[in-house]
Amino acid sequence: MNDAISTYMTADHRHCDQYLASFEQAVDRGEWEPAGISGQDLRTSLLSHFAREEEKLFPDLLAVDPRARGPVQVMTMEHRQMRALLDELREALGKQDAPGCLGLAETLHFLIQQHNAKEEGILYPLADQGLAPRAEELVEQLKAF
Amino acid sequence: MIDTRGLSLDQAPPFHIPARFFLTAPLFVLLAGLLLLWEGPSLLASRWLPLALAMTHLIVIGYLGLLMCGALLQMLPVVLGAPVPAVRWVGSLTHPLLGLGALFLAGGLGYGLPWSLAWGAVASALGFICFLLPVTLALWHARGEPGTRRALRAAALALLVTLLLGLVLSTFLLGLLPLGNFTGWVNAHVIWGLLGWVGLLVIGVAVQVIPLFFVTPPYPALARAWLAPLLLILIVLASLAEVRGWDLTATLALGTVGAGFVLFALLTLWLLVRRGRRRLDPTLLHWGTAMLSVVAAFLAWMLNAPPTLVGILLLVGVGLGLPAGMLFKILPFLAWFHLQHRQLASGRFDLRIPHMGSLLAVNWARTQFGLHLLALLLGMVALAVPALARPAGLVLFLSGLVLEGLLVGVVLRYRRASRAFMATPAP
């Protein structure tokens, strides 16, 4: 089976994990300048990932596979929760509040992990299946976000 | 056909069900610590001493049994998309039965009270059966990572065999059943319980959570898929040889099982060294200590060290430490997760949910790890320096007390935040 979509989107998840890890490490060491940079990288990469899904992947998938409706709703709601945490994180970063940053990053990390497990286990395989004929083209479009 | 059931949010049991298991379990560490403090060095002299057996069962049923059952009721829907049927009933029955079972079993074994032993054996067995029946059904329908599924099924089978062997041993001790080669049967019970149920469950859980918690590379596919089933086969062989008195086969099979677990522990340590999240948090420290304890236990067994040393390494190093480390992540995340849903339901987006760092006092979690490590070291040294047995008991008690305090703190903060959602009307 063509798994170009899963492969691309899963790799995107791993990038976000790495940004979160470097952010935490910088905060932990009290290096606020690198923390600011990796915090911004984390925010940008997560928000573009959500956009890839909400503006392209999910609508395209829903058009070919109505079974995805429930899962897509749940995923979109969790994106909202993550956006709220990202906002809180930016605020804590602005105040150089290390315990706040670390606690929020930890919460975001766990929310992301259980979210990714569901996407990688269910939603992306559905997309690989339903959107197989134009997978490569779709991946190119996703990269543009 | 891809199954989309796993995405429903209401599959997870209500917060109070796992919380009840998690808050009760550390009380048994307090009891185990008090027992060692009270009895002193004589408790550690041999694995066959009544009070050593009592302490072991306080830890494996009271602490580990409650924690593992509570955590699985919560984890199965999330990790394997397998909600446990009638989870409220399972929670309400298993929790008191295991708690009472551990107490009575410890009383019966430790103080030679037949009625207490009988009640303890029956309550523990019923508690585990109430848990195993629905969990087996859930595992039947499980999906997701096949390696985790296999390991968890193997662990569930091992729990069943452990409890059956436990019942056989209790009936013998009560004089209701003649049994040749008692030592062999006890060894088989220990092998299925510690290496089967606990060991295979740790493998199944680690494969899933180590990469997620710490952003490490995944375990190699071969280990993920086949380590647990292979160990299960060897465990069958080792326990059969123990019961039949085939000493050489038993030693060889047990040695291979041990080597398999050492391989797993080294693999885990290697992955942890390569982790993306570099912070040295208490959960990571507990995992590291537990994996080193596995390696040390195997070396001690190879070198013919006293079985109590192997016991302390496995029961305290792995059994008490690992689940404590896991709770530092699981309970705050669960609390946060449920609070999110309260917020959604109440529409109170003006209220802020406390994040994981403010739900769990991380500094106290570090203290808990420190006390745990000290209790482990003192316990081991006490085998050679008996004067250290009581201090080991005291520190064990304190580590349990701090653990309990930490968990109660999370639940109280959860309650306070949860009340705020209900009390004030939306503006």
Image: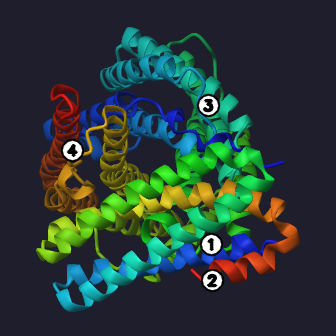
Question: Disc 1 on helix, strand or loop?
Answer: helix
Query: Marks 1 and 4: which is nearer the front?
Result: 1
Q: Nearer the viewer, residue B326 or B227?
A: B326
**Amino acid type, mark 4:** Gly
Whether callout 4 and callout 2 share a subunit is answered no
Tally the marks. Answer: 4
Using the rendered image of the protein, determine whether residue A115 is visible from the camera's viewpoint. Answer: yes
Q: Earlier in the sequence, mark 3 or mark 4?
A: 3
The location of residue A111, given as percent across then percent down, is 42, 57
**Amino acid type, mark 1:** Thr
Question: Residue under circle 3?
Answer: B135
- State which chain disc 2 sits on: A
Question: Residue under circle 2?
Answer: A143
Q: Quadrant of the C terminus of chain B?
A: top left
Relative to B250, say whether A20 is above or below: below
**Amino acid type, mark 3:** Val
Question: Residue under circle 1?
Answer: A10
Q: Is disc 4 in contact with disc 2, using a CB cutoff of under 8 Å?
A: no
Question: Residue under circle 4?
Answer: B400
Query: Marks 1 and 2: which is nearer the front?
Result: 2
What number is the disc on residue B322?
A: none
